[in-house]
Amino acid sequence: MTHHSANHDSPPSPDAAVAKLRQYLLDNSPIYSLILSDITLAKISRGTVTLQLRLSRTHLNSKGALHGAVSATIVDFVTGLAICSHDLREQTGASVDMHLSFLSTAKEGDTAVIHSTAEKVGGNMAFVTVRINKLGEDGTERPVTLAQHTKYVRGTGPPVDRK
C-alpha cells in the first residue's frame, strides 16, 4: 500500500482519471470531437467503462444505420478509457489490431450503450473487448457491434508515486 503525505497529491480517482482522458481525447483529436462530442460516461469501474451516445445523422451511413467507420471510431476511443480505468495511466498506447463484428443496426435517435472492458493489460499489450448495444424503450440492450481491440502499451504505464 502506498501512503501519501500531505505534501504529495494523491492519485486521481478512476472517475477523475477517465473523465480527464475523455476530455483530452475530445479536445485533441478532430475526428473524436466531430463524431463523439456528445458521448457521456455512465459508469466506471476498474478495467471497465460504460458510455452512452445518442445517435444523430452524423453517425449514420447512406442507409440510415450506424456507420461501420463510426463504430470503429467508438471502439478506438473507448478502448483507451478502459485501459485508463484499469490502472489510471494517462497514455493508452497505439492500435495493433482491431476486429469488429456487426450484429445488427441502430438508427438516428437510438441511444447506443457502449461497454468497454480491458480483459488484460500487460507490460507490452492490452486486450480490450467493446460491446456497442442499442438501448430499447424497455431498458434492455440489444447487441449492435462486438469488437476486440489490441493495443501496444509499453512505456505508457500508470503514474508512479515518486517521493
Image: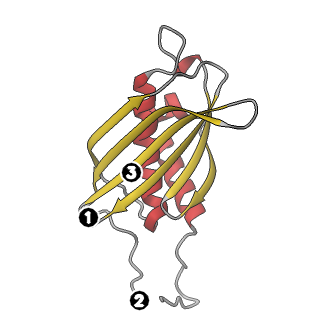
Residue beneath the point at 26% across and 67% down = 123
Percent x, y of residue 110: 65, 25
Give the x, y percent position of residue 130: 45, 43
Residue type at tag 1: Gly
- Residue position marked by numbered label 1 in the rendering: 155
Report crowding for label 3: few under 14, some 14 to 19, many 20 or more residues within 10 A (C-alpha). Answer: many
Q: Would you place residue 2 above or below residue 26 in this image?
A: below
Identified by mark 2, the residue type is Lys
Which of the marked residues, 1 or 2, is nearer the chain's N terminus? 1
For residue 44, side relative to residue 127 (left or right): right
Front: mark 3 or 2? 3
Badge 3 is on which residue?
128
- Judge depth for marks 1 and 2 and give the one in front: 1
The image's mark for residue 163 is 2
Q: How would you rate the neighbour count of disc 1 (Cα within 10 Å): few for under 14, some for 14-19, many for 20 or more? A: few
The location of residue 32, given as percent across then percent down, is: 46, 35
Question: Looking at the picture, does residue 85 appear above or below residue 57?
Answer: below
> What is the C-alpha distance between the residues marked 3 and 1?
18 Å
**Looking at the image, is mark 3 or mark 1 nearer the viewer?**
3
- Position of residue 37 in the picture relative to residue 71 (left or right): right
Is residue 20 rendered to the left or right of residue 99? right
Q: Which of the 4 quarters of the picture holds residue 111?
A: top right
